[in-house]
Image (tube, helix red, strand yellow):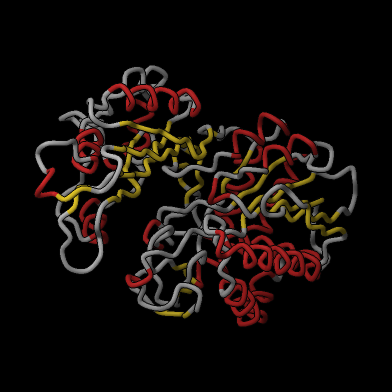
């Protein structure tokens, strides 16, 4: 990869502008109002992979949004790397908290991104990071330096649980056969502290509905005489944690493995500035399960969080009403060995059980997935480590991640392949939040680093 820096310098503005163009497409998979935009996004990714030089690029239809498959085979006897990413994005709400429109990308400088960052929904999660791979492969193909075979599988339903990906993977095992899976949908500690994510949490996502009277009621005529679903739901949610912020669902911790003291000490050795963390979030204290550090709470411990809650009157002015219904969306991040379907059933059973008389409770599971831990003694991890060391000048820190990519465990189950998670975003990039952004330096650094992974993995596989 002798001239990768020169190539990036020469094509810098074009590669940035190409990313900006796909960030303009509002490919929100969760909202039917954006369905045509998601399909439009799939077409854009297909064209990008064709331009990159892939031999075969196809849009694979599913019951939902399509999966883009592409491949470039230079020698069947050489290793094959399968790149996974997603082109759908989270809803941009609340819109009024964005400093610029979420689908009108702008470049702004920040304290952590003095070279500028692109502000737009999907900038980091995952369009920007997915597109690094397209550009890295385009560089290797155009310069005749692709050292092995490559396949792409880019889906449009990751943000809604990858509903149709499992069937696609199971039905296309020969097509997707590979030696290693490469994903950039995670982050690193800092621009001067590279890291490789070695673990992901699983996920169980549910929606709950509490129903009281058969219609909204006048709070003066009925207040204090019938159960108020919003009050009841608030109490039920509050009861899901105890005074030490442990989750109170019976059986929830049965399969939670406690890390050894040695493993916890290794985690603690990773650079972390608690005061800077609090300052970045504008909070005066951290919060969570007693007995664990912040980095342990958001990586190796399970959680339960309310993602949304609503009911009754929320418009301008006042309306004295007892709502007939109250709702909440709840996600549980799970650690490896916790089965998401088991946890979903435990939640459903417990939540229905704690409902008082006078209300009816409905729990609707949405989606979920298993956690994942990747070993650091494989050639995949070692190739990634060497790639980061080449471009950053230092070895990356192995780090457990707090997020979830449910399909990673599916890949290992169905394709018998390990996954390497090479993320280039930062925790401060506000993914899933207003003002999501991705540093231009990070975007280009990913394009610079990824080709070295191909080189070292091919060399180590021989």
- Residue 139: tell me if it is visible: no
Quarter of the figure with the N terminus: bottom right
Direction front: furthest residue: 221
Q: Camera-side residue: 427 or 106? A: 106
Identify the residue shown where x is 13% and y is 49%: 219
Instruction: Check the image and report above or below for 122 versus 150.
Output: below
Identify the residue shown where x is 66% and y is 38%: 379
Q: Picture coordinates of residue 340 (x, y %)?
A: 49, 29
Tally of marks: 0
- Residue 67: tell me if it is visible: yes
Identify the residue shown where x is 41% and y is 40%: 207
Q: Picture coordinates of residue 108 (x, y %)?
A: 41, 79
When asked about the image quadrant of residue 173, the answer is top right
Residue 300 lies left or right of residue 197; in this view the side is left
Q: Picture coordinates of residue 292 (x, y %)?
A: 25, 33
When asked about the image quadrant of residue 94, the answer is bottom left
Identify the residue shown where x is 63% and y is 55%: 156
Quarter of the figure with the C terminus: top right
Q: Picture coordinates of residue 291 (x, y %)?
A: 22, 30
Residue 434 lies left or right of residue 144; in this view the side is left
Residue 47 lies left or right of residue 379; in this view the side is right
Q: Camera-side residue: 59 or 3? A: 59
When asked about the image quadrant of residue 223, the answer is top left
Instruction: Check the image and report above or below for 17 versus 176.
Output: below
């Amino acid at each position: 990869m002798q001239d990768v820096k020169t190539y990036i310098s020469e094509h810098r503005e074009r590669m940035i502008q190409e990313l900006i163009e796909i960030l303009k497409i509002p490919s929100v998979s969760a909202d039917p109002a954006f369905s045509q935009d998601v399909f439009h996004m799939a077409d854009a990714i297909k064209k990008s992979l064709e331009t990159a030089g892939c031999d075969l690029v196809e849009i694979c239809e599913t019951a939902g949004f399509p999966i883009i498959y592409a491949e470039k085979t230079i020698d069947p006897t050489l290793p094959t790397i399968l790149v996974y990413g997603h082109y759908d994005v989270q809803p941009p709400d609340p819109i009024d908290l964005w400093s610029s429109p979420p689908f009108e990308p702008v470049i702004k400088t920040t304290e952590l991104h003095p070279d500028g960052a692109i502000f737009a929904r999907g900038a980091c999660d995952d369009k920007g990071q997915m597109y690094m791979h397209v550009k890295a492969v385009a560089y290797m193909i155009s310069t005749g330096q692709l050292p092995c075979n490559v396949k792409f599988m880019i889906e449009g339903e990751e943000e809604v649980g990858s509903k149709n990906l499992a069937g696609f993977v199971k039905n296309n095992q020969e097509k997707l056969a590979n030696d290693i899976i490469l994903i950039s949908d995670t982050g690193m500690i800092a621009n001067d502290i590279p890291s490789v994510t070695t673990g992901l949490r699983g996920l169980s996502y549910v929606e709950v509905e509490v129903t009281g009277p058969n219609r909204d009621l006048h709070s003066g005529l009925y207040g204090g005489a019938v159960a108020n679903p919003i009050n009841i739901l608030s109490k039920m949610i509050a009861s899901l944690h105890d005074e030490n912020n442990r989750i109170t669902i019976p059986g929830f911790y049965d399969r939670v493995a406690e890390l050894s003291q040695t493993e916890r000490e290794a985690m603690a050795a990773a650079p972390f500035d608690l005061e800077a963390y609090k300052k970045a979030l504008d909070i005066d204290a951290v919060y969570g399960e007693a007995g664990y550090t912040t980095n342990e709470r958001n990586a190796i411990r399970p959680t339960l969080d309310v993602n949304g809650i609503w009911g009754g009157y929320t418009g301008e002015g006042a309306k004295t009403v007892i709502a007939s219904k109250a709702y909440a969306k709840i996600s549980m991040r799970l650690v490896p060995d916790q089965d998401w379907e088991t946890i979903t059933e435990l939640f459903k059973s417990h939540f229905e059980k704690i409902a008082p008389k006078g209300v009816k409770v409905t729990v609707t599971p949405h989606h979920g997935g298993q956690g994942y831990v990747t070993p650091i003694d494989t050639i995949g991890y070692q190739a990634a480590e060497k790639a980061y060391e080449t471009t950053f000048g230092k070895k990356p820190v192995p780090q457990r991640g707090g997020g979830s990519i449910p399909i990673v465990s599916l890949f290992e189950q169905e394709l018998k392949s390990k996954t390497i998670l090479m993320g280039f975003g930062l925790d401060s990039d506000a993914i899933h939040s207003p003002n999501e952004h991705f540093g231009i330096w990070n975007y280009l650094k990913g394009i610079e680093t990824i080709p070295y992974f191909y080189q070292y993995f091919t060399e180590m596989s021989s």
